[in-house]
Image: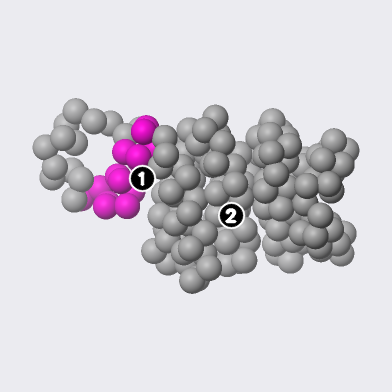
Amino acid sequence: MATAALRNLTASNVGVVAKDMVSLGAVRPLLLVFNEGTEQAQEHAAGVILNLAACHVGRNRIMDTPGASAAVVAMLRSPDSGTRERAAGTITNLGAMPQYQIVLAKEGAIPLLVQLLEEGSHRGREEAAVALSNLAINRQNQLVTTYHSLGTTRLQSLPWRQWVNPF
């Protein structure tokens, strides 16, 4: 399977390989595999995207690809726990860049990460916690993270809820 080979290749030499892969336009086909491939191919594609997001040039190329941020966030909805873990890891890497923190939050990453934090595997919970930490560096995202973490019922009873809209 090609996606498995790419995943292994990017895992061992991420810095060198990522530059070549992204310059050859690998991001868009990987996102297509995630949207249209088998569950196993999707998991491997999520792993490649995670590995590419570990380096600066990979992060930029991923986020420069139209629809990529939505696709990465959509990976958090996968029925496969491994894919969700890799998606959270990718968001951790992308969220390390201030310019991408708001973009990922607007795509709906925060409530899905909170859900993974509550219901995911041990590794998924760890990845979600780090991703939320990176996204919460941004002040606007702090309100959204708090809102989704505490739940709407508790927050609606707080007096400040009347003048702060986290969305």
Q: Give the class, few, some or many, for how many residues have Cα within 10 Å of label 1's Cα (few <14, many ≥20).
A: many
Find residue 127 and report its horizontal and vertical position in percent: 52, 59
Q: Residue at x 78, y 47 (%)?
A: 15
Dividing the picture into quadrants, the one containing residue 144 is top left
What label does residue 77 carry, if any? none
Q: Does residue 12 sit above or below 98 in this rendering? A: below
Q: Give the class, few, some or many, for how many residues have Cα within 10 Å of label 2's Cα (few <14, many ≥20).
A: many
**Which amino acid type is marked by label 2?**
Gly
Q: Does residue 139 sit above or below 76 in this rendering? A: above
> Would you say residue 50 is visible in this rendering?
yes
Horizontal side of 110 relative to 53 (left or right) equals left
Q: Which residues are magenta?
A: 139-153
- Of 38 and 139, the residue lying toward us: 139
Find residue 27 and report its horizontal and vertical position in percent: 77, 42
Q: Residue at x 59, y 47 (%)?
A: 93
Dividing the picture into quadrants, the one containing residue 57 is top right
Predominant secondary structure, magenta span? helix
Q: Does residue 12 sit above or below 146 in this rendering? A: below
Q: Which residue is mark 2?
A: 89
Find residue 60 and report its horizontal and vertical position in percent: 68, 34
Q: On the rendered image, what quadrant is the C terminus found in? A: top left
Q: Are marks 2 and 1 in contact (CB under 8 Å)?
A: no
Q: Kindly state the secondary structure of the residue where label 2 is placed.
A: helix
Q: On the rendered image, what quadrant is the N terminus found in? A: bottom right
